[in-house]
């Protein structure tokens, strides 16, 4: 099948081309992201392949459908960037990669915890400048500290296993109680109890109306002074302005984020020669106790391999008229 691949980086191309050799789809790579201005590039392609920041809204879908696109293959799990109702109306089938790197994301969250606690990001710069002073680098033992995990699905559960290895106590909150978490010795509690007792809080629930700005000024006020907050899930779980106030007052002692509410304007691009206009993001970068990565938690060789293999297997299933387990059905 002819496939137009949008938002292509060199690493995507490398893994997609290698995974395509048995299936021999006709791939054309486009660097720009897909939106209503770039959709015309896909004219004549029955399949379009996109990632997290592509804007597959109604006008974009209408242009794609008019150009002959019948299949949208997402290289990611989330589909909040796709207008599902319009896709259904236009007869565009949607497939996705439901899980590609739960270990990678959980390990990255653990990396943020370790780096922030022991100030490894600051120590790296100091040593390079010949500054071997330890002032300001004081950390704490993770052993016997309490980690609060919000969302204990695939990623949250793996983080619980990792933190158990450090000798931490695990408190958890989820709308569904996973027996595996309790088997590990973790304890489910309601959010106020988790906020009041955790030394570290890590977010692993999906973004939806109920979880939008879950971490707001009210929640922050219930936490232990000096709390460490980690977010590798979705930016809008956190009210960034409220977090900035918490960092200024010292109520928040550490913040580690791999995602940011307005990240589609910034992440995955080299903007090092430009003036960044997002003042909230820029304020975050000024705190010594804030560590930000640009949505790289998923970014492991295993994940890129899994994304490429699953994407082509999804496309092949649809091309052959077979049921595809990763099709998104709209009811
Ligand atoms: P999952 O579906 O396995 O687990 C999500 C858990 O959240 C489930 O146990 C669910 O019951 C729970 N949940 C649902 N609503 C909730 C609520 N209101 N409050 C608390 N918990 C709730 O998902 P996963 O694979 O573990 O992924 C978790 C999140 O990680 C995803 O939603 C995605 O946003 C994010 N993610 C980030 C990256 C990255 O690179 N940073 C990569 C993949 C996934």
Image (tube, grey):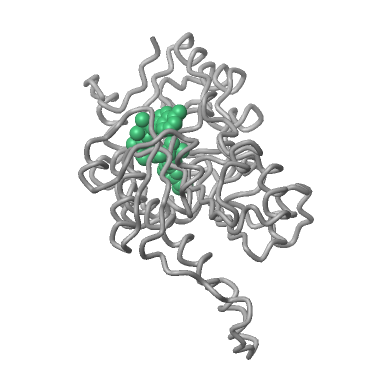
| Residue 320 x/y as whole percent | 23, 24
| Residue 170 x/y as whole percent | 35, 49
| Residue 137 x/y as whole percent | 58, 76
Residue beneath the point at 40% across and 51% down: 105
Q: Quadrant of the C terminus?
A: top left
Q: Is residue 3 left or right of residue 185?
A: right
Name the foreground residue: 10 vs 331: 331
Residue beneath the point at 63% across and 76% down: 136
Q: Quadrant of the N terminus?
A: top left
Name the foreground residue: 156 vs 40: 156
- Residue 97 lies in quadrant: top left
Q: Is residue 83 visible?
A: yes
Q: Is residue 206 left or right of residue 316?
A: right
| Residue 157 x/y as whole percent | 31, 45
Q: Vertically, is 125 above or below 114?
A: below
Q: Vertically, is 157 above or below 283?
A: above
Residue beneath the point at 76% across and 53% down: 276
Q: Vertically, is 189 above or below 247?
A: above
- Residue 109 lies in quadrant: bottom left
Q: Vertically, is 4 above or below 304?
A: above
């Amino acid at each position: 099948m002819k496939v137009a691949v949008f938002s292509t980086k060199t690493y995507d191309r490398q893994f997609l081309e290698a995974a395509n050799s048995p299936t021999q789809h006709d791939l054309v790579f486009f660097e720009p992201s897909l939106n209503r201005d770039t959709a015309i590039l896909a004219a004549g392609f029955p399949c379009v392949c996109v990632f997290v920041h592509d804007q597959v809204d109604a006008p974009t879908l209408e242009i794609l459908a008019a150009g002959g696109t019948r299949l949208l293959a997402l290289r990611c799990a989330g589909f909040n960037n796709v207008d599902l109702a319009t896709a259904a109306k236009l007869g565009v089938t949607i497939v996705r990669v439901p899980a590609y790197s739960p270990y990678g994301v959980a390990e990255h969250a653990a990396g943020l915890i370790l780096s922030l606690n022991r100030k490894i990001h600051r120590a790296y710069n100091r040593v390079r400048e010949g500054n071997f002073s330890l002032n300001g680098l004081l950390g704490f033992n993770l052993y016997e500290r309490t980690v609060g995990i919000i969302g204990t699905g695939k990623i949250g559960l793996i983080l619980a296993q990792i933190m158990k290895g450090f000798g931490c106590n695990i408190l958890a909150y989820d709308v569904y109680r996973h027996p595996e978490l309790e088997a590990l010795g973790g304890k489910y509690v309601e959010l106020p109890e988790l906020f009041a007792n955790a030394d570290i809080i890590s977010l692993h629930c999906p973004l939806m109306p109920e979880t939008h700005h879950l971490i707001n000024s009210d929640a922050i006020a219930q936490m232990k002074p000096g709390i460490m907050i980690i977010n590798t899930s979705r930016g809008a779980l956190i009210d960034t302005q409220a977090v900035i106030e918490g960092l200024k007052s010292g109520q928040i002692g550490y913040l580690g984020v791999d995602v940011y509410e307005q990240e589609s304007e910034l992440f995955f691009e080299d903007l090092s020669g430009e003036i960044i206009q997002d003042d909230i993001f820029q304020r975050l970068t000024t705190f010594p106790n804030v560590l930000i990565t640009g949505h790289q938690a998923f970014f492991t060789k295993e994940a890129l391999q899994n994304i490429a293999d699953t994407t082509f297997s999804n496309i092949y299933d649809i091309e052959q008229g077979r049921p595809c387990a990763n099709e998104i059905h709209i009811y």
